[in-house]
Amino acid sequence: MSDAQDQPQPTNPPHPVDDFVTTDHDLELPTGVLKYRAQTGRMIIGSEVVEDGVFAGLKPKAQIFLTSYTAIAEDTEEGQDSGRPVVFVFNGGPGSSSAWMHIGLFGPRRVVANDVNDRTPPPYGLVDNLETTLAHADLVFIDPVTTGYSRTAEGEKPEDFHGFTGDRDVVGEAIRMWLTRNNRWISPKFLAGESYGTTRAAALAGHLAKRHGIAFNGILLISAVLDFATIDFTEGNEAPYIHYLPTFAAIAHYHGKHPGRELEDVVAEATDFAYGDFSRALERGHRLADSERARVGARLAELIGIDEEFVALADLRIDEFTFFTELLRDQRLRIGRLDSRFTAHPGKVASEVLGDDPSYPAIQYPYTVGINHLLRAELGYESDLTYEVLTARVQPWSYKEFENSTVNTAEDLAFAMRMNPHLKVYVGFGYHDSATPFAASEHVLAHLRISDESHDQIVRRYYPAGHMMYVDQKVRVDQLRDIDDFISWASGAGDRPASNNPL
């Protein structure tokens, strides 16, 4: 026998397997005890392999971390009620886990959060969420690749999923597999995304309809951005200056620049000005008469709370970071981007650079504590990986599909609504959100290529807070009530909720 034959032959490493942990819980609600089952762990996502025209099986590509909550139906074999709505939830970033909406809004346990006027000191913690959406619908929280505990399969490249299409497809596959494995295809189905998660949700609505024939009952868009051109301050793009103006006016109102006035009145007035005189002035450019420039500049300064002379020097164009720095510079404060109610000392008062967002650490700290405690101590999932709450490890994010154009998923949403006239949409706006300004989203919604009847399927709700508006506890309660009403309506069991948009 040859030496080669004596050598041990290489073997392929075993495929990774799902590692879900299942636990049962009781939640004391005002309406009675809610018994629910939590399942948390990593689902293996594979792709079909065809070699030389022959099917060669499934190759593991990604390990997607999910946490699902289902109300326990005592009289069923699986413990799930297939007629119950199910909501698939994810945040954005790109690079964000689902922790924010998991323990900030929807889930049965919620973080003890830092709000602007209710700052909680470390070590933070969790309490029961008595308003949880789980009382009305089952919940599945999804962490995209490299966020949370989600990673690629061994030997796969993370960058394959760090881009628009790769991310969309792997999240969509996780949704399809969850529906299949849990026998929930006949359940009312919902997508819920926040920030870039709304970009993803709109893309998924179109993709899953085309690829797998999945028709959703409803889509929840929280702090929405569907067309990046509406918010991207680039040379030659005047649109963001217009779309941000109503948000700047709302923030100025919060910080005392419109004493004695109602927020909604200020926003309505700023919106009329933004899409009227201000829009026409920007369109004129250097052709604008000096007298008209002075009049428009004075009105702009009054609405957004910035010095009139500074507005004139800026040629009427105040971008987001300039506004954050200038609004309260005389008080040696800068304001936050995610939530512009928050302020902090800028470090260097004369700096023209935003620096750290004053709102992010206040929100991040309790959420990081809360999700790490919940997953291991309460739900029993053990891992030595870092739970990536919000990470830059996904950068650079690829938008190669939009080469020579701006990122826009509005048509994906419109397609889904045209093909499924029963599809309903909830949009939640924060008045003080400077990451995804509400007027920009309204502009996109107003230009969706859908029927008048489909436009009537969109419900808008405004809240006096920021990007994660639910860090304000009154807003959280109000928003969850609005979401419950929306899910009931979209599932065919309730009336259409009213919108409260001031625009």
Image (spheres, helix red, strand yellow):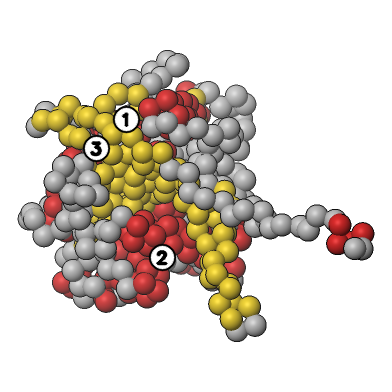
Residue 377, percent from left and from top = 42, 25
Residue 200, percent from left and from top = 42, 59
Residue most extreme to the bottom: 53
Q: Mark 3 or 1 closer to N-term?
A: 3
Tag 3: residue type?
Tyr
433 displayed left or right of 487: right
Please name whichever residue, 213 or 250, is drawn nearer the observer in this view of the structure.
213
Label 3 with label 1: CB-CB less than 8 Å: no
Tag 1: residue type?
Arg
- Looking at the image, which residue is at 17% across and 49% down? 76
Q: Is residue 18 visible?
A: yes
Please name which of the two marks, 2 or 1, marks the residue nearer to the observer. Answer: 1
Q: Mark 2 or 3 closer to N-term?
A: 3
Tag 2: residue type?
Ala
Q: Mark 2 or 1 closer to N-term?
A: 1
Q: Mark 2 Cα within 10 Å, few/some/many (few <14, many 20+)?
A: many
Q: Which residue is mark 3?
A: 36
**Distance of mark 2 from mark 1, alpha carbons?**
29 Å
Q: Mark 1 Cα within 10 Å, few/some/many (few <14, many 20+)?
A: many
SS state under label 3: strand
Q: Which residue is mark 1?
A: 110
Tag shown at residue 203 = 2
- Looking at the image, which residue is at 52% across and 50% down? 17
- Looking at the image, which residue is at 24% across and 37% down? 36
470 displayed left or right of 356: left
Determine whether 142 is above or below 416 in the image: above
155 displayed left or right of 184: right
SS state under label 2: helix
Residue most extreme to the front: 1
Please name which of the two marks, 3 or 1, marks the residue nearer to the observer. Answer: 3
